[in-house]
Image (cartoon, rainbow, N blue to C red):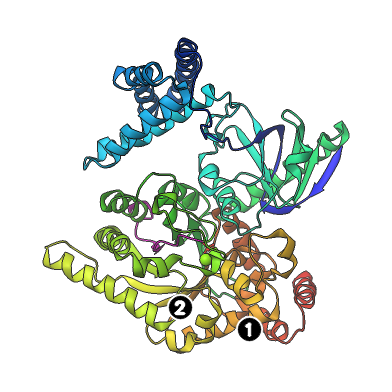
Amino acid sequence: MNNIKGIAASAGIAIARAFTLEHPDYTVTTQKAENVNGEIAKLDAALDKSRTELEAIKERTRQELGEKKAEIFESHLLILDDPELITPVKDKIAAESVTAEYALNETAEQFIKMFENMKSAYLQERAADMRDVTKRILKHLLGLNYVSPSEINEEVIVIAEDLTPSDTAQLNRKYVKGFTTNIGGRTSHSAIMARSLEIPAVVGTKNVLSLVKNGDLIIVDGLEGNVLINPSEAMVAEYRSKQESYAKQVEEWRKLRNEPTVSKDGVHVELAANIGTPNDVAGVLDNGGEAVGLYRTEFLYMGRDKLPSEEIQYNAYKTVLEKMEGKPVVVRTLDIGGDKELPYLDLPKEMNPFLGFRAVRLCLERQDIFRTQLRALLRASVHGNLRIMFPMIATLGEFREAKALLEEEKSKLISEGTAVSENIQLGIMVEIPSTAVMADQFAKEVDFFSIGTNDLIQYTMAADRMNERVSYLYQPYNPAILRLVKMVIDAAHREGRWAGMCGEMAGDAIAIPLLLGLGLDEFSMSATSILPARSQISRLSRAEMQELAVKALDMRTAEEVVELVRQVTAK
Ligand code: PEP
Ligand code: MG
């Protein structure tokens, strides 16, 4: 047995066989072919294998997710058998004496480019389908042994170097019982998504992938951050009972689903949820969320080949607003960059992507992208209680510029006769230290603040949130962070604004007593953290936590703060 330590990224315990996930390299290296007939036979064989695979996936999808979802694989099968694609590939092999993979790649790229340049949304979607099918055939031609995360069809624990947010989004909860990665931290986006999918996860183990073989028995303990490889029977039994007591605890918390969030001495705070897609709203309501405190819209832009149209965005925002039935929904405008890439924007690689051309910086330059999003949001605003929030604001100038673009789009829509809500609150994320320090000035111009501690901590401590080697510096409880948080909350209150927090710190059991004491109005967290937080707050007195916060602000180290919180809350 091997027991390795990582970072507990998503609560729960999973026990299943390992599935190691490594990304394939589809690069075609051999162009010239010796045996043309051999290449054609190779292509036919790859087409046959792809067909068998697609038939099976289609059938499984039909049974599990219904006819509609299975149609996509029907269209993949049609592409696979389409003579308009296959005949030119075979002709190219014969005419130019090239390999099947080279001929397929070249021919398919031409079709894909052509479809992508068409106006019709239908044809543009065909481009994405054709890219998928081409990869599937190439996988067989190149002899790659790869199953994509979405194709996993037995209960497993996924083991990977890292998971991109789009890999994570594809994981099917029914089969993927847990995952563990070499790199990443609690606030990397795959960890955040694991929490919204409610999949136990341990990240930042440094070497799990090299220690595990496919099929090994694995325990992922997302409560403590442990990964056990080929555990003994006694260990498995111990973890099964841990799993059961955690399930019982979850049942207890569920009793608070429809209760308000009130401290022991009667102070109300709002517990909101962070979401990445409209599908996540079900989890918010199921976990008793009182609002959406952060809708990370960038996931709408990821996992596709081009920018989402205004219509696609409008529908997504409208869906979330409608499902939340009048409860507040804070939508954050596009925050791409850092660990969230958009390959189709073709942005140059940067030395320091977290300090680079990202989020609102990109939006202010690429106004075409920003205005489309703002229009979609404004149009959707009549369907619920919309609040708009700009990410990564560093200066008042940026806020004013972004607000001016919003106002311009609003006037245009109104003059076109489109209804727009008159009650859209406009706020900013406070995740850059300069903005926290200047919060008193910002508070005169914004409706609200949402403190983004995931970034605020990394910028204040100069410690990359993705780098497990400096994770010891990533200190939410450092008095420096607490003092910045206090500055922001106090500045908001002096101007009659509200202050929330949507960084992971808002759902952290050690931080919650401190934040309650500092006067935070809204706590926005992973949906699964809401009920434990509600239960915790009901046992805390706000007046006592105010005293705790005053003491904590005067402590010298993060460790001293943790010790103090433990002492005070254990009483
Ligand atoms: C944050 O920085 O705290 C935040 C909520 O945004 P993200 O994690 O998406 O950077
Ligand atoms: Mg951020």
Vertically, is 374 above or below 115?
A: below
Picture quarter with the N terminus: top right
Q: Which residue is mark 2?
A: 498
- Between disc 1 and disc 2, whose residue precedes? 1
Is the Cβ of the residue at disc 1 closer than 8 Å to that at disc 2? Answer: no
Vertically, is 247 above or below 345?
A: above
Picture quarter with the C terminus: bottom right
- Quadrant hosting residue 369: bottom left
**Given the image, on which type of amino acid does mark 2 rest?**
Trp
Other residues around mark 1 within 10 Å, as few (<14) / some (14–19) / many (≥20): some
Q: From this viewpoint, is residue 291 visible?
A: no
Q: Nearer the viewer, residue 200 or 323?
A: 200
Which residue is located at x 18 percent, y 71 percent? Answer: 411
Q: Mark on residue 109? A: none
- Left or right for 51, reference 567: left
Which residue is located at x 31 percent, y 75 percent? Answer: 403
Q: From this viewpoint, is residue 53 visible?
A: yes
Vertically, is 516 above or below 287?
A: below
- Quadrant hosting residue 89: top left
Question: For the magenta stretch, what is the residue range?
Answer: 322-337
- Left or right for 426, reference 340: left
Q: Which residue is mark 1?
A: 483
Residue 345 rendering spot, x and y as whole percentages: 39, 54
Nearest to the eye among marks 1 and 2: give it: 1
Label 2 near ligand 1 (CB < 8 Å): no
Which residue is located at x 64 percent, y 29 percent? Answer: 155
Q: CA distance from mark 1 to mark 2?
A: 18 Å
**Given the image, on which type of amino acid does mark 1 rest?**
Arg
Q: Is residue 461 magenta?
A: no
